[in-house]
Image (cartoon, rainbow, N blue to C red):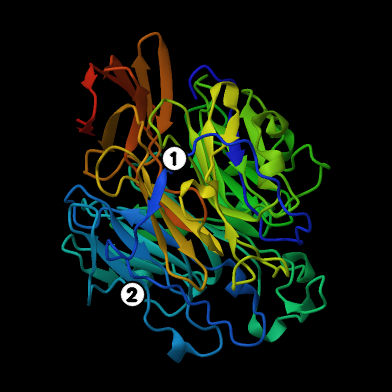
Amino acid sequence: MRDSCLKLLVTCSLLGTLACTPPTEPQEDTPEPWFQEDAAARGLTFVHRSGHDGRYLMPEAAAGGGGLFDMDNDGDLDAYLVQSGSLTDPAKRTPGNQLFENLGDGRFREVQDSGAGAGSGYGMGVACGDVDDDGDVDLYVTNFGPNTLLLNDGSGKFVDATDVAGVGHDGWGTSAGFFDYDRDGDLDLFVANYLNWQESTELDCANPMGEPDYCSPLNYDSPSMDTLYRNDGEGRFTDVTVAAGLDAGFGNGLGFVFGDFSGDDWLDIFVANDGIGDQLWVNQQDGTFIDRALVAGVAVDLEGGVPKAGMGVTAGDVDDDGDLDLMVCNLVDETDSVYRNEGEYFSDVTARTGLGLVSRRYTRFGLGWVDFDLDGEFDLFQANGKVMRSPSSLAEDGFAEINLLFKGRDQGSFDEVLPRGGTTEPLIAASRAAAFGDIDDDGAPDILVVNKDQRAHLLMNVHEDVGNWVRFRVLERSGRDAEGAVLFASVGDHTERQDVRSGYSYLACNDPRVTFGLGEATKIDALEILWVDGTRQTLGAFDVNQTHTIQRD
């Protein structure tokens, strides 16, 4: 981030081939682990089940979502894990989604009879946000089948309000998120949708070995339209997809992130599509959107100029010039797509980042630009897992791959961290969602990784050389997280930008609190907040290694 000149967006894809050449080991960056896998020891006992039993049904390949959020307003992050179950036998969809309470020290216990497991669909992902402005974080679960809205009563109990709210879209929902696109003070909802798929229309496909395997989405030629819901107040929504102009484009939506990508202080929408050009829906400030992805240079990247298999996506100001860059991660044999924001358009700077040669060996899903070592530069984590089996896999699961961790450098470049994935012992799984947040409140961000047909991983940050930090929880007047607000922190002679955002990565919701890594700096000299309605507020100095809560007057 600091003194760099890149803005990046990463999208990951579901469409894949096989990597035939064993990867060569990159030059070692640091021999010490950055993370320790600690799920079992900390009581996080979730095991994902895709329900695969014989035939290869497409939704199985994409599933595996989860999130980190504060369900009870006690200041620590609880965990929500989305179960899939079975596409052919609803009786096998048990146990359902699971909620785990943080006991205050980063250890968890499962919350029984919370109502958070409600829903009848085949689970995909989750979005988090206070939709009824009562100060409690609610959950929206995407499924193959009807999606589910769970309202939080503040005590760890959830009520299924899907029908009353009008948000039970019955399709194949993937990534989703809450944000206030119309500046009316409440959270609206965007849902990315994948294919128009049914079991009765499933195809029989084979991998390069001639064995049965999952199909490419292009085999179906059945893209879908994403969904935008406007919050009408008190948790009731109206489907405004057509009225907002989003019916002008169809896609195989997997990843989603919102932010002001056009520089007009209004929130836009970016969608990563699998095998179809990505979309950048620019807010027209009148309740409508226009897709400017092709004109802006983010529909496809420079590698061949054709659509990739976009999956996960993240956004951030990696070159400290004040605007948002984009990164999309893709399938094996496809590089990541990293875009620097130039104002009126984006430049594809993937070749300059150091990510291409390493990342293209894997199929990447969940990802995030997060400053794990708190030195003031965004690092990068990618959760990997095949969608087509490999004969050369080192794991029993032919879809399993190792994850990747990169240390951020100046000028927007990255170096791979060894041991690969940042852990002493390699973790090889078919990873999907990656959710980011400080689970044990020591200042250093941790990672929840959901693995298809395996137990979840909890990667606790054990980096031995972390810098100082300042964390902010930014709230609107109602007490909800100010999704979409932008923070500009002045540290010495430079300024860093971060956005309040829980919706990014893949099938995940993330900690909305903003953490500035300061390295050796001992304070933030000033903080400017750009609220979602366009007003600005400047606050004084903040001491390091503390969390500060700022609620709008």
Answer left or right for 421 relative to 252. Answer: left
Q: Amino acid at mark 1?
A: Glu
Point out residue 356 in the picture as x, y percentages from the top left corner.
Answer: 70, 40
Point out residue 348 in the picture as x, y percentages from the top left corner.
Answer: 71, 32
In depth, the one of 249 and 66 nearer the eye is 66
- Position of residue 221 relative to residue 131, above or below, is below
Residue drawn at x 77%, y 65% as measured from the top left: 218
Point out residue 381 in the picture as x, y percentages from the top left corner.
Answer: 51, 45
Q: Within the image, what quadrant is residue 201 found in?
A: bottom right
In the picture of the structure, the residue carrying the numbered disc 1 is 32
Residue drawn at x 33%, y 21% as measured from the top left: 528
In depth, the one of 132 and 128 nearer the eye is 128
Answer with mark 1 or mark 2, whichever residue precedes in sequence: 1
Q: Secondary structure at mark 1?
A: loop
Q: Within the image, what quadrant is residue 44 found in?
A: bottom left
| Front tag of 1 and 2 | 1
- Position of residue 419 relative to residue 325, above or below, is below
- Give the spatial CA distance, label 1 vs label 2: 39 Å
- Residue 517 visible in the picture: yes
Q: Which mark identifies residue 117?
A: 2
- Position of residue 62 relative to residue 34, above or below, is below
Quarter of the C terminus within the rendering: top left
Q: Secondary structure at mark 2?
A: loop
Residue drawn at x 58%, y 32% as measured from the top left: 414
Point out residue 400 in the picture as x, y percentages from the top left corner.
Answer: 59, 65
How many numbered discs sit on the rendered protein?
2
Q: Amino acid at mark 2?
A: Gly
Residue drawn at x 35%, y 23% as measured from the top left: 518
- Position of residue 368 relative to residue 50, above or below, is above
Answer left or right for 356 relative to 133. Answer: right
